[in-house]
Image (tube, rainbow, N blue to C red):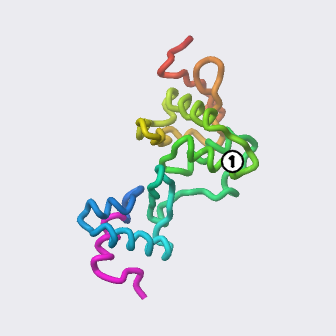
Amino acid sequence: MSAFRSEMERQAWNTVKARKAFHWNDLEAAGYNRATAQDFVRRWEQAGLIRMIRKDQHRKIYANAKHADQPSVEEIQAKDAVQAMWTLMRRLRTFSPKDLVAHVNATQHELTQKDAEAYCRALAEASYLRVLQSPVRGGQDRFYALVENSGPTAPRRTRRWGIDDPNTEEFKPSQRRGNR
């Protein structure tokens, strides 16, 4: 039995299957009827072909289930919230501080939005993270991607305006603030 009911559905799948993330309106932009695009996405989710990876306000964002690297709660158990955030960053392709808070708070640790934002900002200033999407008015979050995965142990913020990395045994000063 095929997962697709028609050749049109198969073509729609080919349009989005390699994307890191998509919403049904990406299919609409590709020329598919709105209701048809929504039906395809709903059917693919029920069939396990795609998984919702995040919500951008009211929009559900999906990814191919074969490529969705959402870790389970068991996979992010750590000794503290910082280590749990680092583990998540290494597993997720893109993330926002809000994503980190949601996942870490599902474990035995507590993490505030402010702490997650501060850690992401510090890692970005030390060139561990790249900003993919800056926030805009209206509530969208800043999204990041990990660009320097130095190892399993979480780099730590220091009072010296930078990051101490136990994996490389190096101190990386903040690029934004300079050495103070």
Q: Which of 110 and 139 is in front in this view?
A: 139
> How many numbered tags mark residues here?
1
Residue 143 visible (yes or no): no
Residue 145 or residue 25, whichever sits in front: 25
Using the image, determine if residue 48 lies above or below residue 6.
above
Left or right, residue 44 beside residue 13: right
Residue 100 image point, x, y percent:
60, 45
Give the residue at x 41% y 40%.
133
- The answer to whether one can see residue 177 in this image is yes
Q: Which residue is drawn at 44% across and 55% down?
A: 59
Residue sitting farthest toward the bottom? 1
- From what the image shows, is residue 121 above or below residue 31? above
Q: Can residue 2 be found in the magenta stretch?
A: yes
Q: Is the magenta stretch mostly helix, strand or loop?
A: helix
Q: Where is residue 98 in the image (x, y as percent from the top left)?
A: 56, 44
* In the foreground, 50 or 123: 50
Give the residue furthest to the left.
31
- 90 relative position to 11: left or right: right
Q: Residue 118 placed where, x, y %?
A: 59, 30
Asked if 69 appears above or below 44 in the picture, the reply is: above
Name the residue at 74% across, 44% down: 109
Task: Based on the picture, tell me whether residue 77 belongs to the magenta stretch.
Answer: no
Amino acid type, residue under disc 1 in the picture: Asn
Q: Please state the extent of the stretch shown in magenta in the rendering.
A: 1-16
- Please indicate whether residue 152 sits to the left or right of residue 50 in the image: right
**SS assignment at label 1:** helix
Q: Residue at x 63, y 50 (%)?
A: 103
Residue holding disc 1:
105
